[in-house]
Structure formats: structure tokens, C-alpha cells
Amino acid sequence: MKLYYAPGACSLSPHIALLEAGLPYDLVKVDLRAKKLENGDDFLKVNPKGQVPVLALDSGELVTEGPVIVQMIADKAGKNLAPARDSEERYKLLEWLNYTTTELHKNLGPMFSPVLADEAKGFFKDRAMAKFKYLETELTGRDYLMGKQFTVADGYLFTMLMWATDRLKFDLSDMPNLLAYKARVAARPKVQEAMTKEGLLKAA
């Protein structure tokens, strides 16, 4: 398999999933602004959407959209990264993946735009903060979103928390559960490996 990624983008989520799953893969770096691959090829010929992540399967099929990609990885791995298909728990995982993509990702993403007015950024920040407050309550007494077991939903939420705290400088100091959760996920060896490979952490 081949993962098309941009350092620190939402493609970090499937990158974490691939490493946690122990599946073999190659990394292809994408310049999202220029829409170019490292070798100069046109990324739009790979994905006309112009977005990462893209997972190229060994069959040649391309899969896009992070929440779908991470479930595919989990199902291929069989390592408890997602509950069994058709189980009640699997639908709960889907709920968390959808919450993260619609309520967090889609509110945080616009804040990286250099042309968006500060007033508009404030609007998106307020919306995202309300969603984080909900998560703060939901994480009470939990190690991970699904309880004690790390799943692919955690890699996605962790990526959004990285965006919020490390890049957008959100102050989440009044959300101790959320900060403890972020630290817990960040301490996982495969998470650190993914971040190191993307240049987000210095190699030990």
C-alpha cells in the first residue's frame, strides 16, 4: 500500500493507523499548495480532489477520505483497532469518526486559511471550542474514545487536537481530561513513530 500525505495534515491519522496495524506501506509526500508530489508529478492526477489522505491499494485502487481509509486499515489488520463490522460498538466508532470529521475537522480546517478574516476565524474557533467541551465531558473516566481500547478514531481526534493546540494555539487548560488524553495518545510508540517520519518530532 502507499499513503499520500502532507506533514501534520489529516493524513497523520491513517499514518498512525498503518503503524498501529503493523501493515507494510510506502509514504509519498505531497505539497498541497502546489499540488505536486516530491518528484514533481501532478498530484491532481492521483486525486482530483486535491486533498490528502489517499491510500493506494496493491490492486491499484485508490481510496480517499480519512474516516473510510482508517476503517479499511483496521479491517485489514484485525488488531482491535476497530470493533467488528455490524456490531453495536462499530456504529459507536462510526459516530466518533463522523463527529471528528464534521464537528472538529470542518471547523478547524478553515482557520489555516491566510485570507480568512479574524472575525471569521473567531467564529470557527468558538464552534470548535464548544465541541471540545463536549469531548472533555465524554472522556471522563476513559482512556480512549471507546473506553480502554485504542482505536482508529483516537488517531483522528489526536490529529485534530494537535492542530488546535500546537498549530492554532487553542488554550485547553480548563479541559484536563482532553489534555491528559492527548498526552496519552502522544506517548504511544507508533504515534511517535508516525510523527517522527513526518518531521513533526525529532528522531531520538
Image: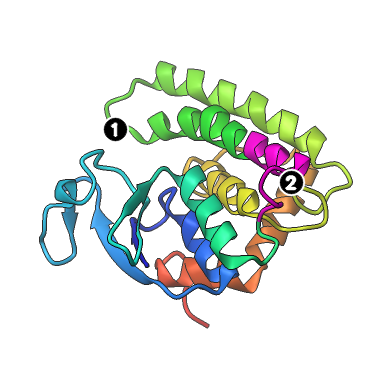
Give the overall secondary structure of the magenta segment. Answer: helix
Position of 65 with respect to 192 (left or right) is: left
Q: Which residues are magenta?
A: 82-96
Q: Which mark identifies residue 145?
A: 2
Q: Which SS class for mark 1?
A: loop
Q: Quadrant of residue 98?
A: top right
Q: Quadrant of residue 199?
A: bottom left
Q: Are marks 2 and 1 in contact (CB under 8 Å)?
A: no
Residue 115 point in image, percent of width and height: 27, 26
Relative height, residue 192 to residue 128 (above, below): below
Relative height, residue 186 to residue 11 (above, below): below
Q: From this viewpoint, is residue 201 visible?
A: no
- What residue is rendered at 55% in x and 51% in y? 71
Residue 105 point in image, percent of width and height: 49, 35
> How many tags in the picture?
2
Snapshot colouring: rainbow
Q: Name the N-terminal-most of marks 2 and 1.
A: 1
Q: Residue furthest bottom?
A: 204
What residue type is disc 2 on? Leu
Does the stretch in magenta take in 84?
Answer: yes
Report which residue position mark 1 lands on: 114
Relative height, residue 80 to residue 119 (above, below): below
Q: Quadrant of residue 60?
A: bottom left
What residue type is disc 1 on? Pro
Distance, label 2 to label 1, CA atoms, is 32 Å
Callout 2 environment at 10 Å: few (<14), some (14 to 19), or many (20+)? many
Residue 6 point in image, percent of width and height: 33, 55
- What residue is rendered at 55% in x and 33% in y? 104
